[in-house]
Amino acid sequence: MGIKLVSFAVVSVLLGYYVYLPLPEALDERWKLMMVDACFRSLEHLAELTEFIGLKHYMEVMTLLTVAEMVGPMSDENVTVVDTTFNGVAVRVFEPTRRKPGLRRAVIYMHGGGWCLGSAKMQPYDALSRKTATELNAVIVSVEYRLAPQHHFPDQFNDVYAVVKYFLQREILAQYMVDSGRVAVAGDSAGGNLAAAVSQQIQEDPKVEVAIKIQVLVYPALQTIDFNTPSYQQNGNMPILPKTLMVRFWSEYFSRDKLLLKDMKDNTHTGREDRDLNSLVNWSILLPEKFRKQYKYSPPGQGNEGTSSTIVPGIFDPRAAPLLAPDEKLRALPRAFIMTCEFDVLRDDGVMYATRLRGAGVHVTLEHFEDCFHGVLMFITWPTNFAIGQKLMGRYIDWLQENL
């Protein structure tokens, strides 16, 4: 009996040590977050092990997160759900079942997951789209773009662009009874990156006759220059998206080259010929003081040749990193709603983009959540239903209701 008690105590201590994380007091439901993060970290450790021994690529193991959350295209009394393709790209379309007088609004949504994980068919995104379609009386097109490591930039961007361009045809909008003046693009995390990139590029396409009215970017990833911003430093070990994982996502988006991953982790991937881009992400200028805090700015890539775009094409392409677009490209962009979280390595990407958009004359609403961590839109369904996730989803839908 004594041995069993001692063994139980030891296991309990070890489990508690593994699960417990010192989290900021501003975060609610901290123990729930610790448990969720422990599950995430366990899968990450398994992914690292299987890649190390050569069984599977790291991201192929991490896709278990996606597979576990998949749901079918089930219609209900409020929404008709169909899986189809637009321009050869898989999409899930949500249409309100009850037809109301007049034309409807539409949102083209891009899921998150670091360009490597995620799916429009995951339960949280399915739930978000259903609720948005019902409350806005809107058609929601959720894009199932290709993923790394099988596909690299610009495949993900090209898929999303193809869907948006297809849907913006007047005959397609008429087919779905959508008002051509009330179409939005939206996305979270990597999806926010894709929504921002498409908004920039679509305006220059002479074959697109219908303009996007608004863009909604939820904790977006927007720049590949500096992985040492204050939010990366402050939140480098935060649950769900630590710096190491975010940098890995960026690296896999472009290449399987482990040298790029190492240089990105060290923030030495910028070559001399690329350093003129530093001014576009200089957080000592673009961030308000409350986000700069006590951190000191150091230009990335100093004293290093860097991996740079000469070795990895596209790494500083605005289609991959929208914050690197020149001012003249930003001026014609539609109104933007940017949502950021305090405890998120990507916080400063969204804040800096808001600063640059405002400087270019674009109307921007920046809403910062002081009690929020990255990825909360993934936690709006049982058993990982967080109150802050519901709050963020509610604000997202409310803003669309008021502005679309």
Image: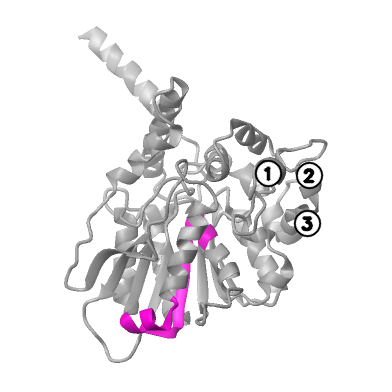
Which residue position is annotated with label 3?
279
Tell me which label, 1 or 2, sits earlier in the chain: 1
Secondary structure of the residue carrying numbered label 2: loop
Which residue position is annotated with label 1?
228
Mark 1 to mark 2: distance in Å? 9 Å
Q: Which label lies toward us, 1 or 3?
A: 3
Reply above or below: 298 against 217: above
Asked if labels 2 and 1 touch by Cβ distance under 8 angstroms, the answer is yes
189 in the magenta segment? yes
Reply above or below: 77 against 403: above
Can residue 88 be seen from the camera position used here? Answer: yes
> Which amino acid, by three-letter code, is at mark 2?
Ser
Reply above or below: 327 against 105: above
310 in the magenta segment? no
The N terminus sits in image quarter = top left
Tell me which label, 1 or 3, sits earlier in the chain: 1
Dot 3 crowding, Cα within 10 Å, few <14, some 14–19, many 20+:
few
Label annotation for residue 7:
none
> Which amino acid, by three-letter code, is at mark 1?
Asn
Secondary structure of the residue carrying numbered label 1: loop
Magenta extent: 168-194
Q: Is residue 142 left or right of residue 355?
A: left
Asked if labels 3 and 1 touch by Cβ distance under 8 angstroms, the answer is no
Mark 1 to mark 3: distance in Å? 15 Å
Task: Determine the residue positioned at 70% across, 51% down.
Answer: 293
The image position of residue 349, as x and y in percent, is: 62, 56
The image position of residue 66, as x and y in percent, is: 34, 45
Label annotation for residue 298:
2
The quadrant holding residue 88 is bottom left
